[in-house]
Image (tube, rainbow, N blue to C red):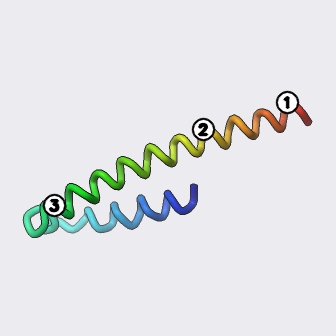
Amino acid sequence: IEELEAAIARDEEALHDPALYTRDPQKFAALTEAVAKSRAEKDAAEERWLELAEMVESNG
């Protein structure tokens, strides 16, 4: 989860460059896609972590 958060932060930082879209629209699109994918993976990982934590609590 931490690695995904770092990737999201890194890519979002690059997207904050106001000239990126005009200078390199393909890179802008790739970064936008990467952020969306990383967020989805992070959400899934957090959901799984919560499920496992609940299982541990109910068994412990």
Q: Which mark is residue 49?
A: none
Q: Nearer the viewer, mark 3 or mark 2?
A: 3
Quadrant holding the C terminus: top right
> Element type at marker 3?
helix
> Element type at marker 1?
helix
The residue drawn where x is 67% and y is 43% is 49
* Amino acid type, mark 2: Glu
Choose the circle earlier in sequence order: 3 or 2.
Answer: 3
The residue drawn where x is 8% and y is 64% is 22
Q: Quadrant of residue 34?
A: bottom left
From what the image shows, is residue 21 above or below residue 60? below
| C-alpha distance separating marks 2 and 1 | 17 Å
Q: Find residue 10 and report its horizontal and vertical position in percent.
A: 39, 67
Neighbour class for label 1 at 10 Å: few (<14), some, many (≥20)?
A: few
* Amino acid type, mark 1: Ser
Neighbour class for label 3 at 10 Å: few (<14), some, many (≥20)?
A: few
Residue with the mark numbered 3: 26
From what the image shows, is residue 35 above or below residue 7? above
Mark 1 and mark 3 residues within 8 Å of each other at the beta carbon: no
Quadrant holding the N terminus: bottom right
| C-alpha distance separating marks 1 and 3 | 48 Å
Q: Which mark is residue 47?
A: 2
Choose the circle earlier in sequence order: 1 or 3.
Answer: 3
Q: Find residue 53 and report its horizontal and vertical position in percent.
A: 75, 40
Residue with the mark numbered 1: 58
Q: Find residue 7 and report its horizontal and vertical position in percent.
A: 44, 63
Q: Quadrant of residue 28?
A: bottom left
* Amino acid type, mark 3: Gln
